[in-house]
Amino acid sequence: MTDYYVYEQPLNEKVRSFLRLEKLFQQYSFNLKHGSGWNNRVAIDSILELLAFTTRSDIKLEVLKELERQHTRLERLSKRPQIDQSQLSSILKNINKRIGDLQAVSGQLGQDTKNIELLTAIAQKNSVPGSICDFDLPALKHWLTQPKATRQQHIEKWFQPFGRLDRSVQLILDILRHSNENTDEVAQNGFFQKSIDTNQAVQLLRISIHKDEECYPEISAGKHRFSIRFMKNNDPSLRPEQCKDDVAFKMMMCSI
């Protein structure tokens, strides 16, 4: 699918949260890898957003529930003769490992990181409009003068409590994204609508558009149906318009 751009639409709040977490984890990993002072700042902001996210909700419990639900659903598939038993067994073992990892975490995720004085100071200054300047927080300026290896070591230690959550969320989304096959569809005059089988428990829509298409999907979904409008916007200063031509695309309705 390298010739396609993929757009995803979560169909429940749980998957929406998992996708937001995945984006934060990706943002953290990218900026940690590149390691400049500017990258360090974004990596720290990612950690602070993870702290805020996990403080607002018991995300660890939500992830555990979803891992256990997926495990139960996949175990039922083991009775089907056409299933690759070796691959299924490997996935089930991986789920069990992630469950054990999260259950081993006592208390709230990231509590030790939350108590880091520098991170607390950065979080407080982040609420002020504009970027944090050297005069706002000399301690941050001083920390950024430390050797790259030292800064990387600190950041990795601050992120460490979220590593197990990262791996668990990625496993959940990987299983969900491979839970079905793509179908070839056509949006007539740039519009497509489909009913949702309430017995199917669709959690995520994946819309794949060939890179040659100069449009993107706007997806509106409810419990019983969803619709897709393919839009064009060659000039970002103008309002997007719906495509007037038919648009061929691939669609996956992910459910497990």
Image (cartoon, grey):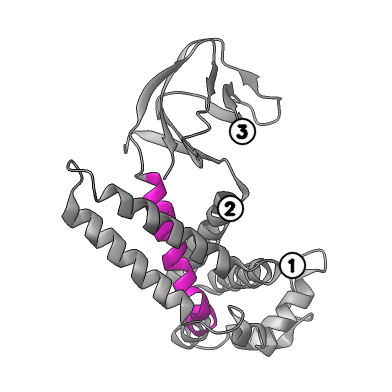
Q: Is residue 197 left or right of residue 232?
A: left
Count the marks: how many?
A: 3
Type of amino acid at the residue the image marks with label 1 = Ser
* Inter-mark Cα distance, 2 to 1: 32 Å
Residue holding disc 1: 131
Q: Earlier in the sequence, mark 1 or mark 3?
A: 1
Q: Residue 170 magenta-drawn?
A: yes
Residue holding disc 2: 14
Q: Work out whether residue 103 or residue 192 is closer to the camera in this orientation and state it.
A: 103
Q: Work out whether residue 238 or residue 154 is closer to the camera in this orientation and state it.
A: 154
Q: Is residue 118 above or below residue 70?
A: below
Q: Are marks 2 and 1 in contact (CB under 8 Å)?
A: no
Q: Are marks 3 and 2 in contact (CB under 8 Å)?
A: no
Residue 53 place in picture, x, y as percent:
65, 66
Q: Earlier in the sequence, mark 3 or mark 2?
A: 2
Type of amino acid at the residue the image marks with label 3 = Lys
Whether residue 136 appears in this view of the structure is yes
* Inter-mark Cα distance, 3 to 2: 15 Å
Q: In the structure shown, which secondary structural element does the residue marked by tag 3 occupy? A: loop
**Dominant secondary-structure state across the stretch colored magenta:** helix
Residue holding disc 3: 223
Q: Is residue 81 left or right of residue 42?
A: left
Disc 2 residue crowd, few under 14, some 14–19, many 20+, Cα 10 Å: some
Type of amino acid at the residue the image marks with label 2 = Lys
Residue 129 place in picture, x, y as percent:
82, 64
Residue 2 place in picture, x, y as percent:
32, 38
Bounds of the magenta segment = 156-177
The quadrant of the rendering that contains the C terminus is top left
Q: In the structure shown, which secondary structural element does the residue marked by tag 1 occupy? A: loop
Q: Is residue 253 left or right of residue 158?
A: left
Q: In the structure shown, which secondary structural element does the residue marked by tag 2 occupy? A: helix
Residue 45 place in picture, x, y as percent:
63, 69
